[in-house]
Image: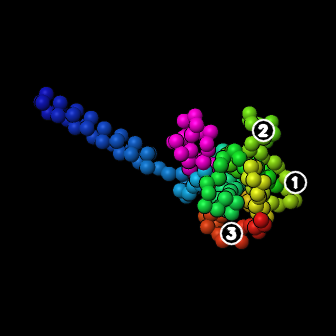
Amino acid sequence: MKTTKKRNIVLLITAFAFIMGMAITVADAAEPAVKVPNVSILMKCPQCALFGTTLPDGKMEITLAEALKVHGFCALGGAFSFRAAKEGLKLLYGNELPVRHNIKVETSHACCQAAALAYITGARGKDYGAFHTRGKLIILPPEEKKIVFTDIPSGKSVTLRTLFNPHSTMKPLLQRAFKDHSFAPEVTKVMNEKIHEYLTAPIEKLFIVEK
């Protein structure tokens, strides 16, 4: 009888451990409802290489997922700015890697969009950071509807005239969802659709390029 009880206890413990292990595995496998594609922008940072915060070549990879963490819940603006940075820096530098903190950014899209551009390029406002003469972030009047990337050492720049503002889509949805949380899945649906659109649409659907 004692042997049977002991065996049953062992079986119960084993079953419990198995169920808990399965639960942890399922929890670990869970993914956010908003799908963030694995896309990135390659930069280089000589200062980082000098002091050892990157590999010796100074290369760094900045992902969309990282950029979206700057503002969190408002993913459309961050995704739109990520695409703008990817296209603008490619036009400005060609096959050369952009040097982070050597880029001035002027944008008429503030809030999460400007924050994402600041994170990607290292550009900051005049009172933000130790080296005011290096990266610069300038907020333009919204009616200008443009994003300008300038390589500070050479003075070369490229302008993207934005054909729309993601906030026009996002703002009313967020306002409704904040008041009524049951509307949140609709916001998630729109985020998934628009992030895909912003990352894959032909550039002429998003911007007019001026060099």
Q: Residues within 10 Å of mark 2 (few under 14, many from 20)?
A: few
> Of helix, strand and loop, which one carries label 3?
helix
> Of helix, strand and loop, which one carries label 1?
loop
> Of helix, strand and loop, which one carries label 2?
loop
The mark closer to the camera, 3 or 2, is 2
The foreground one among 178 and 59 is 59
Residue 132's label in the rendered image is 2
Amino acid type, callout 2: His
Highlighted range, magenta:
44-67
Residue position for label 3? 203
Q: Position of residue 115 (x, y in %)?
A: 72, 47
Q: Position of residue 66 (x, y in %)?
A: 59, 47
Q: Position of residue 145 (x, y in %)?
A: 82, 61
The foreground one among 203 and 178 is 203
Q: Residues within 10 Å of mark 3 (few under 14, many from 20)?
A: some
**Quick check: 65 above or below 92?**
above
Question: At 27% across and 35% down in the image, what residue appears?
Answer: 13
The foreground one among 11 and 100 is 100
Residue position for label 1? 141
- Quadrant of the drawing holding the C terminus: bottom right
Question: At 44% across and 45% down in the image, what residue appears?
Answer: 27
Q: Residue 142: name its quadrant.
A: bottom right
Contact between labelled residues 1 and 2, with CB atoms less than 8 Å apart: no
59 sits to left or right of 17: right
